């Protein structure tokens, strides 16, 4: 009897890291590294893989996002970054679903065909990879501006840099990101 091969969880690493980059509070980024949270989530998934009952890549990715969401909530609780304001609380699954939608919206308009979904997933991978090649300030500025909707002045205050410097980070970062994405599609 041959056992089913274990799925390669590492292939989801860059997508999970992108979700952490988007969802991790800027105040926590100075205390926790996105890669550490992703690594912890993948270790827990590997440990619990015998209990996993999903069949498709989409189910596996959803399961990994659930583990990641729990770890992000644990990090937030650990540092007690927010007061218990029930109106501000949101289920973690909703947060990650919104993140996934923001990523997809950033790349392309809503697509439903299976082949288009596969292309979209590949684009998300390329975006995550491209963001990983940027300097920390460029990546932070882009994530805050385009995924979290922060204004230039908010980003400026957060990074402790003048608005002109933040605009430069955004411009250089987007230029590098576009170049990286074009290079991957050629």
Image (spheres, helix red, strand yellow):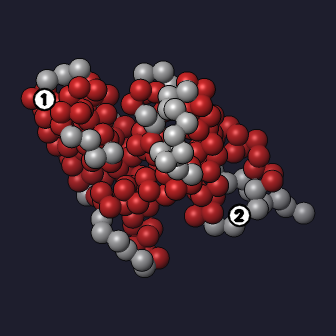
| Residue most extreme to the bottom | 113
Q: Residue at x 13, y 34 (%)?
A: 167
**Residue 8 locus on image (x, y percent):** 63, 50
| Residue most extreme to the right | 1
Q: Tell me the distance, in whole angstroms, between the alpha carbons under discs 2 and 1.
A: 47 Å
Mark 1 and mark 2 in contact (Cβ < 8 Å)?
A: no
Q: Measured along the vertical axis of the image, is residue 16 above or below residue 116?
A: above
How crowded pointer 2 is (Cα within 10 Å; few <14, some 14-19, many 20+) is rated as: few
For the N terminus, which image quadrant?
A: bottom right
The picture quadrant where one finds residue 158 is top left
- Mark 2 or mark 1, which has the lower sequence index? 2
Q: Residue at x 81, y 51 (%)?
A: 50
**Residue 149 locus on image (x, y percent):** 28, 46
Residue 172's tag is none
Residue 54's tag is 2
| Residue most extreme to the left | 164
How crowded pointer 1 is (Cα within 10 Å; few <14, some 14-19, many 20+) is rated as: some
Is residue 168 left or right of 110 when viewed as pictured? left
* Secondary structure beneath label 1: helix
**Residue 129 locus on image (x, y percent):** 38, 44
The picture quadrant where one finds residue 115 is bottom left
Q: Is residue 79 visible?
A: yes
Which residue occupies the foreground of this view, 166 or 113? Answer: 166
Closer mark to the observer between disc 2 and disc 1: 1
Which residue occupies the foreground of this view, 92 or 3? Answer: 92
User: Mark 1 = which residue?
Assistant: 163
Q: How many marks?
A: 2
The picture quadrant where one finds residue 168 is top left
Q: Residue at x 23, y 33 (%)?
A: 154
Q: Residue at x 49, y 58 (%)?
A: 97
Q: Measured along the vertical axis of the image, is residue 111 above or below residue 143?
A: below
């Amino acid at each position: 009897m041959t056992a089913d091969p274990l799925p390669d969880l590492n292939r989801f690493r860059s997508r999970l890291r992108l979700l952490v980059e988007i969802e991790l509070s800027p105040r926590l980024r100075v205390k926790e590294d996105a890669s550490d949270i992703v690594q912890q989530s993948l270790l827990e998934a590997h440990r619990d893989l015998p209990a996993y009952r999903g069949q498709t890549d989409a189910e596996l990715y959803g399961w990994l996002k659930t583990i990641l969401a729990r770890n992000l909530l644990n990090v937030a609780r650990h540092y007690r970054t927010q007061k218990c304001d029930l109106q501000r609380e949101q289920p973690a699954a909703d947060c990650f679903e919104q993140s996934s939608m923001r990523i997809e919206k950033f790349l392309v308009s809503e697509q439903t065909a299976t082949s288009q979904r596969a292309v979209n997933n590949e684009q998300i991978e390329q975006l995550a990879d491209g963001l990983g090649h940027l300097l920390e300030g460029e990546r932070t500025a882009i994530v805050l501006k385009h995924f979290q909707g922060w204004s230039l002045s908010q980003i400026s205050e957060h990074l402790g840099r003048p608005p002109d410097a933040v605009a430069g980070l955004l411009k250089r970062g987007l230029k590098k990101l576009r170049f990286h994405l074009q290079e991957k599609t050629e």
